[in-house]
Structures are given as C-alpha cells and as structure tokens.
C-alpha cells in the first residue's frame, strides 16, 4: 500500500494538469458547437466538400455534426488521443522511472517482491486513469447538456467514455509491457508513444483505403470509434474480446519480463 | 555460521565481462572487506547478491536462504548503502526515511532519530537541496534505521568529509559489536585496513586473494631503512629475500621477505646510526598482488 500511496502522491500534480487540459478542451470544444448548431445542415455540406484525407484525419467520417452527439463524436477523437497519450506515458513511466531516476537501488533492496511493486504501480495507474476518465465524463455530460437544445444524449456520452476507458487501459498496459521488455528505460516512452502514433496513422489510412480494412484489428483506434459506437448502438463484441486479450497479454508480459529483468542502474 | 555464502557466481553482460566464478563466505559478526579497483566487479557482485541483477550461473545464499527465491524475506534484515544515492524528487528527508521505514514491520522512529542526530542530519530539509555528502548521510540513516543483521556497503564513504567518515566508521563498529555482519566494498585500502577482519581482493571479475587482514600483512614484506656510519657496499644486502634494494652511500632501503633473523645478523655486523622496520601498508601489499598476477 505504501508504494501505491507514493505513486498517487507523485502523480497528483500531473493528473491535475491533465484534468485542467481536458476541462479546457471539452469546454472550448462544446462552446464552438453553440455557434455551429445555428448554421443547420450547412456544416455537414462544408465538411463533405473537404478532401477525404482531411476528413479522415479529423475523424469526421459519417458523423452528423449538426447534432450534439455527432459533434461530440468528433470531439471524442481528440479526447481519445489525449487520454491514450496520457495512459501510454503513464504506463511506460510507472514501470521504467525507478531505473531512469536511479531510485531502483533504493526501492528494490526493500523486503518486497517485484510482483508486489508491479501490482502497486499498475493499481495506482488504473486509479489515475479512472480519475482522468471520470473528469472527462462529468465535464462532457455537463458541457454537452449545457449546449444541447434537443433530447438528452447523456447515455451516448457515457457510451463513448466507456470506449475511451477501454482505449486508456489498452495503452496503459501495452506501454507498461514495453517498459518491462525494453532494456534501456529511457526508450520506453519514445517506443510507447511511437506505437500510439503509428497505430493512429494506420487508422487514418484504413479510412482512406478500403483495401486496408483488414488492418482494423491491428490498431486500437478502430476498436472504439465514435461513428461505430453511436450508429451501431454499442461496443463490437469482437473488439472488446480482442482488447481484453491484448490487456491480459500485456499484463502478463509486464510481470514475466519485469521479474526476470536485470535492473539498469 | 556463514551469513553470506557465494558459490561460483558468474554474471556476464553479453560479451562484456561482469564477474566470473566468484566464491567466498562471510561469517556471522565479521566485517568483510571487498577490495579492487573501479570496474573490477565489486558492485556487480553486490547487486547480484541483492537480486537487482540475476546471475548467469552459480548461486548464493544469505542467512542460509537463496538470494533469488527468498529475496524479499532476506532483505527484511539487510541494510544497503550504494555508492551513489538517488532519491525521489520533492521529498523531505523525514518523508523519505518514513517511506523507507514503512517497508519493515517494526517501529523505526527511535533509531531513525538517533541516527540522524549522530550523522547531524536535518530531517526537515528537502532532499533536492542537499549536498552530495548530506545525501550520503540520508543513505546511511535509511540503510541502518531498521537495525539490519547484515549491512552491505558499496564504496560508502565517497562524498563524506573526514570527520563524518570517522563518525560513520564508529557507527559501523558499534553496529558490528551489537551483532551485525558487514560486507564492505571499497577501493580505498586504508578504510578496509581500519575496519575489516578479512578481505577478498577482486580483479577483472575474479577473486585473486581471500585472506585475513592480519595474515595478509604478516606474510608479506617488511620495509627496512638503515643508515650507517660508514659507506656500505652495493651488494652487502643483496641476499635472498631482499628486493627493491637501493643503496645511497650511508643509506640503504629494501623490502625483505623471509626469516628476519638472517637480515638482522647482516645488520648487526655493520655500525648503524638509525634503523626503521615498517609494516608495509595494504596499498603496497595490494600492488604486490596486482603486479604478481600480471606477471603470470
């Protein structure tokens, strides 16, 4: 419990800064909806005239930006990217920082197993990710509701946040596994964020080229897309199972490799 | 009873050398020195014993328990001070020490305050603001606050001023008297000479000598300096057992190993005005071992 508490305290300031950033993005993003909603359907025509590559990059796809849930679906992509970056950096840092900051010689000579250390650190990371998600969920509900003039879309917002939570957990555990696997602790963040960026670009590529459709299982950015969650009425079971398998695989990799690891001091 | 038993411990880093076939025992209650130049494998051995890194082959036990399988249990009674100390940002000394104490199932507050007083450590300061020497003091206090049965020190005195080094050695001797076993690694021979009962000399990853400090000194050369009233022949002291002979008219210097009576008889037949027979210090013995090894 002492390691868990220490990690919560160490990450408090950065979590507050991220939460303020999220509040700002949700608040300012939804404020723009107030202006857009007055233009009626013309916004969709404007977007449709944009090059398809730009549409794919912005994550517009088949979303109806004139509706509040459609517009929030667009904002959702940016929130997911932010949340995924946060989770990837958190997972990689949590595992590699004792070696990077040379505190490993303090912590790992204490009467605790590496399994205990990893469990405490992953536990703290999950709580941090939950707080991040709850702040996003609550601020989204409040701001969407404030600018919404039609029926309540709280259920849709909650569904999207569920998708974002799965993405956060996926990148958290994937990055933790990367950090446990790579020998040089300083490389864990660049590799983790590199994976994130390349899978995002891959998801854009899939939107542009239909013959890349098969790659949708490789990039988590295709697992919980707003257009699918909103239009298909919920999570795709196949992607949920795939996500859970990836998470379990990553967690096992983290424990197995970290227990065998020669600490880089 | 042996507190540490190391059997054929080998650690390689790919093609790079770590340690090779290292074996030694540390008995309960002794202060065991582990000496060798930088890069000889002292820290690698210690980090393997603490399961920070895993051995390529061989095994070791501490308190009769396997260093890998029983690592957490063993570490309950180990205090460790690394050569360089690093701590978490934005922590006060007392928070760090409380965090360190929280891993042991006992109340360490009293000992923590005692140690801080001995080492003249301000518990309320931020660790980031401390000098290297003061950070080292934090390391000493956090390594000893749980009153460990085995204290492992890896080049512990770097950064400490002579006065603090003296206090630190007194503290270690006190802990040793209370029953703690100490493994002390250093490349500063006078430290080892002052504190240790036995010593292992490590060179290029291999133990080249394992000896009692007293035997190491007894079995070796005496430094002899003689001043005579008359000029002395250059070959007068060129007898068996004499090395490094330097004759400068009335002054003779040499190292002697063997039956001291032989050389004393030679000295008795000359008219001397001054004589000094000195124990060589560990530095000279150490250099002797290194040179001898290199000759092979």
Image: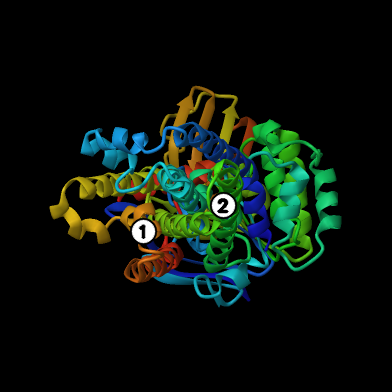
Colour scheme: rainbow
| Disc 2 crowd, CA 10 A, few/some/many (<14, 14-19, 20+) | many
Mark number displayed over residue B253: none
Viewer-closest of A108 and A245: A245
Q: Where does label 1 land, which residue?
A: A231
Viewer-closest of A52 and B99: A52
Comparing labels 1 and 2, the label whose residue is closer to the camera: 1
Residue displayed at 60% across by 44% down:
A15
* Label 1 or label 2, whichever comes before in sequence order: 2
Q: Chain of mark 1?
A: A
Q: What is the residue that sits farthest to the left in this orientation?
A: A211
Q: Does B153 appear above or below A42?
A: below
- Residue B271 in sight here: yes
| Disc 1 crowd, CA 10 A, few/some/many (<14, 14-19, 20+) | few
In percent of width and height, residue A172 lies at 46, 55
In percent of width and height, residue A235 lies at 39, 65
Q: Which quadrant of the view contains residue A173?
A: bottom left
Q: Does B184 appear above or below B252?
A: below
Residue displayed at 37% across by 65% down:
A243
Q: Are marks 1 and 2 on the same chain?
A: yes
Using residue A263 as the reference point, say whether residue B156 is left or right of it: right
SS label for mark 1: helix
Mark number displayed over residue A137: 2
SS label for mark 2: helix
Viewer-closest of B136 and A260: A260
């Amino acid at each position: 419990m002492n390691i868990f508490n220490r990690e919560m305290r160490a990450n408090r300031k950065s979590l507050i800064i991220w939460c303020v950033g999220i509040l700002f993005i949700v608040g300012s993003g939804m404020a723009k909806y107030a202006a857009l909603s007055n233009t009626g359907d013309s916004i969709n025509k404007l977007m449709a005239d944009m090059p398809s590559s730009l549409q794919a990059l912005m994550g517009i796809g088949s979303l109806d930006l004139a509706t509040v849930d459609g517009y929030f679906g667009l904002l959702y992509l940016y929130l997911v990217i932010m949340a995924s970056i946060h989770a990837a950096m958190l997972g990689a840092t949590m595992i590699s920082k004792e070696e990077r900051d040379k505190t490993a010689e303090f912590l790992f000579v204490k009467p605790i197993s590496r399994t205990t250390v990893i469990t405490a650190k992953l536990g703290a990371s999950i709580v941090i990710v939950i707080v991040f998600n709850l702040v996003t969920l609550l601020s989204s509900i409040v701001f969407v509701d404030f600018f919404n003039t039609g029926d309540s879309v709280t259920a849709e917002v909650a569904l999207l946040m569920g998708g974002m939570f799965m993405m956060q957990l996926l990148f958290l555990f994937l990055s933790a596994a990367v950090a446990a696997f790579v020998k040089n602790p300083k490389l864990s963040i660049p590799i983790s964020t590199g994976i994130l960026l390349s899978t995002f670009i891959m998801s854009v590529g899939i939107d542009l080229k239909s013959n890349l459709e098969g790659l949708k299982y490789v990039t988590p950015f295709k697992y919980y897309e707003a257009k699918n969650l909103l239009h298909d009425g919920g999570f795709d079971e196949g992607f949920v199972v795939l996500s859970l398998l990836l998470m379990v695989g990553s967690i096992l990799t983290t424990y197995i490799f970290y227990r065998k690891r020669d600490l880089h001091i | 009873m042996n507190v540490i038993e190391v059997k054929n411990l080998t650690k390689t880093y790919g093609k790079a050398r770590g340690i090779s076939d290292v074996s030694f025992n540390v008995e309960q209650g002794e202060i065991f020195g582990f000496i060798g130049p930088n890069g000889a494998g002292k820290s690698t051995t210690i980090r393997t014993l603490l399961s920070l890194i895993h051995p390529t082959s061989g095994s070791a036990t501490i308190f009769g328990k396997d260093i890998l399988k029983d690592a957490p249990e063993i570490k309950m009674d180990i205090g460790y001070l690394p050569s360089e100390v690093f701590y978490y940002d934005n922590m006060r000394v007392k928070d760090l020490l409380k965090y360190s104490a929280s891993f042991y199932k006992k109340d360490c507050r009293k000992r923590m305050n005692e140690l801080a007083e001995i080492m003249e450590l301000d518990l309320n300061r931020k660790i980031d603001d401390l000098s290297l020497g003061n950070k080292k003091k934090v390391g000493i206090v956090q390594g000893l606050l749980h009153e460990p049965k085995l204290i492992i020190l890896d080049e512990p005195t770097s950064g400490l001023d002579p006065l603090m080094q003296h206090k630190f050695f007194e503290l270690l001797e006190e802990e040793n008297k209370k029953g703690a076993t100490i493994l002390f690694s250093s490349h500063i021979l006078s430290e080892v000479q002052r504190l240790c009962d036995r010593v292992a000399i490590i060179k290029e990853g291999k133990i080249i000598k394992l000896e009692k400090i007293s035997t190491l000194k007894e079995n070796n050369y005496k430094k002899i300096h003689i001043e005579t009233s008359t000029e002395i022949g250059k070959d007068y002291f060129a007898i068996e057992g004499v090395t490094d002979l330097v004759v400068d008219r009335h002054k003779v210097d040499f190292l002697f190993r063997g039956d001291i009576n032989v050389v004393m008889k030679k000295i008795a037949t000359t008219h001397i005005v001054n004589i000094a027979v000195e124990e060589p210090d560990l530095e000279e013995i150490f250099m002797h071992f290194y040179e001898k090894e290199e000759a092979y």
